[in-house]
Image: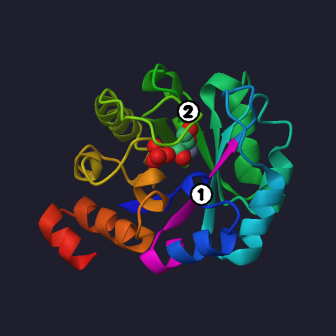
Amino acid sequence: MRIAPSVLSADLGDLDRAVALAVEGGADLLHVDVMDGHFVPNLSFGIPVIEALRRRTEMELDVHLMVSNPDRLLDRYIAAGASWVSVHWEATTHLQRLVVRIRELGARAGVALNPATPVEVLTDVLGDLDFVLLMSVNPGFSGQAFLPSSFPKAVRLRELIRAGSFEVEIEMDGGLGRNNIAEAAHNGVQVAVAGSEVYGQDDPVAAIRRLHALASGERLAAAEGRA
Ligand code: DX5
Ligand code: ZN
């Protein structure tokens, strides 16, 4: 499983440290939450912060666009350094055109689904996607409780992907941590976003290593020992 620490939970006054901790812990991607105060109630950061992160690391930046009209600045997010881009199904009308455009611009294309949106809405667009981001909390804030209905959704999505022989990865975002990461892996989650479980801990490096270990089947005690 790939682990994607979410910068939203890091000390935003010290991006160097946020990046260094992710690299040292062996993170696979850096998750970057863009919020516009319209699609979601919260505001976070945008293109200048993506550029700042890009200058600091070669790590792939997984940019999660929680914005209305994601097509408006799409080119600029990718030019700023986004390697993976997810747009919300709920935020756009012409989804297929948008995801094709993401790929044309050289990034991996993803669609994010809110907890109340069924995976079946993606049936006819899966062939144009590289990944699907299943929100396991309502988007807008880190540190929220995991919604258990997310695992059955991952299983149903896996069935849709298999039925069409698509190559689409399943990412999950929100409320993931040491207590549910193994179950996430078991339910087919291939990329796990972790905000407070990484940057909210005293030792974020150990936290990333522990998540990797638990996802690959180690027991918590053993994973704690390695971390
Ligand atoms: C929530 C964001 C998440 C958030 C996850 O809207 O999309 O990426 O940072 O934070 P945790 O892991 O604390 O739920
Ligand atoms: Zn996110």
- The stretch in magenta equals 22-34
Residue type at mark 1 is: Val
Disc assigned to residue 7: 1
Q: Nearer the viewer, residue 82 or 128?
A: 82
x, y (%) of residue 55?
Answer: 77, 74
Residue 39 visible? The answer is: yes
Residue type at mark 2 is: Pro
The local secondary structure at tag 1 comes to helix
Disc assigned to residue 139: 2
x, y (%) of residue 165?
Answer: 40, 43
- Which picture quadrant has residue 222? bottom left
The correct choice, above or below, for 93 with respect to 157 in the image is above
- Which picture quadrant has residue 128? top right
Q: Badge 1, how many Cα within 10 Å: few under 14, some, many 20+?
A: many
Q: Nearer the viewer, residue 215 or 109?
A: 215
x, y (%) of residue 9?
Answer: 55, 53
User: Number of numbered discs present?
Assistant: 2
Q: Nearer the viewer, residue 62 or 224?
A: 224
User: Mark 2 or 1 closer to N-term?
Assistant: 1
Residue ID at (75%, 28%): 68
Q: Is residue 29 magenta?
A: yes
Disc 2 CB within 8 Å of nearest ligand 1 atom: yes
